Image (cartoon, grey):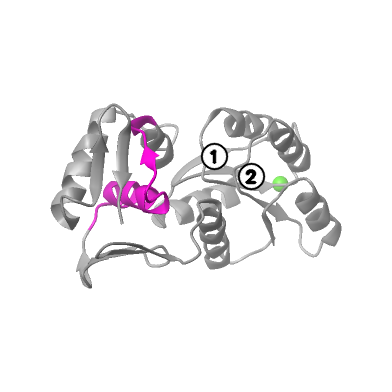
Amino acid sequence: MRILIVEDEPTLARQLRQTLESAGYAVDSAHDGEEGQYLGETEAYDAVILDLGLPEVDGLTVLDRWRKAGHKMPVLVLTARDSWSDKVAGLDAGADDYLAKPFQSEELIARLRALIRRASGNASSELVAGGVRLDTRSGRVTLDGEPVKMTAQEYKLLSYLMHHKGKVVSRTELIEHIYDQDFDRDSNTIEVFITRIRKKLGADLITTIRGLGYSLQG
Ligand code: CA
């Protein structure tokens, strides 16, 4: 899952990035509204964290432009403390959730997980496919009740496929959603990760659909 952070305070932006990366997300950062708007329009994100007070273009305008252009990714806005008018304006402009500063990173992560889950049509924070269970809260994966160790990249790939169970996901889509902007993307590595996941969780879990991509069955 890939997240965009649009936040102009360098310390907070860095902390957010670290928190999200250690929770298993691929993360891109923008430090003003113009750059943020551009990334949101041109890259594929599973969710966006958008500060409202931004240089160049303010957060509400960015959000409004995204929504008018038909970009539907879930957006969580960061508002000034106790500013109910910010919250109302954010929700009216098309935000899916908001969080007032200062906030606990655990709450931010929990809200993001919920947004991503809802956007992909999953009600529970535990994703299940056959004997495989992926707990999005702890990042743990089990097979028939036994814990399975996954690398960070294997987890990202599996998590994306589990969120989109039963759908055909192309290799390009996978690359877009498990790597950040700066990552040296090599589509061959996807095949390598799929092979490793099959070894760990069973050959039948992920089907290769020739010419189209992959589909996780459940
Ligand atoms: Ca700000």
**Residue shown at the point (17%, 43%) measured from the top left:** 195
Q: Is residue 155 magenta?
A: yes
**Residue shown at the point (68%, 29%) measured from the top left:** 34
**Residue shown at the point (22%, 43%) measured from the top left:** 194
Q: Position of residue 1 (x, y in %)?
A: 44, 47
Q: Is residue 171 magenta?
A: yes
Left/right of residue 60 with respect to residue 217 in the rendered view: right
Residue projecting furthest to the right: 85
Asked if residue 186 is positioned above or below residue 123 in the image, the reply reads above
Left/right of residue 24 with respect to residue 19 in the rendered view: left
Q: Is mark 2 within 8 Å of ligand 1?
A: yes
N-term-proximal mark, 1 vs 2: 2
Give the amino acid type for the residue marked by disc 1 in the picture.
Ser
Asked if residue 198 is positioned above or below residue 127 in the image, the reply reads above
Q: Which residue is mark 2?
A: 7
The magenta stretch is 150-172
Give the crowd class for mark 1: few <14, some 14-19, many >=20 residues within 10 Å.
many
Q: Are marks 1 and 2 in contact (CB under 8 Å)?
A: yes
**Of the pair 24 and 75, the residue shown nearer to us:** 75
Asked if residue 154 is positioned above or below residue 83 in the image, the reply reads above
Q: Secondary structure at mark 1?
A: strand
Left/right of residue 153 with respect to residue 22 in the rendered view: left
**Of the pair 43 and 52, the residue shown nearer to us:** 43
Give the amino acid type for the residue marked by disc 2 in the picture.
Glu
The quadrant where residue 211 appears: top left
Q: Secondary structure at mark 2?
A: loop
Q: Position of residue 132 (x, y in %)?
A: 27, 63
Q: Quadrant of the C terminus?
A: bottom left
Q: Position of residue 94 (x, y in %)?
A: 73, 47
**Residue shown at the point (50%, 51%) measured from the top left:** 120
Q: Which mark is residue 29?
A: 1
Give the crowd class for mark 2: few <14, some 14-19, many >=20 residues within 10 Å.
many
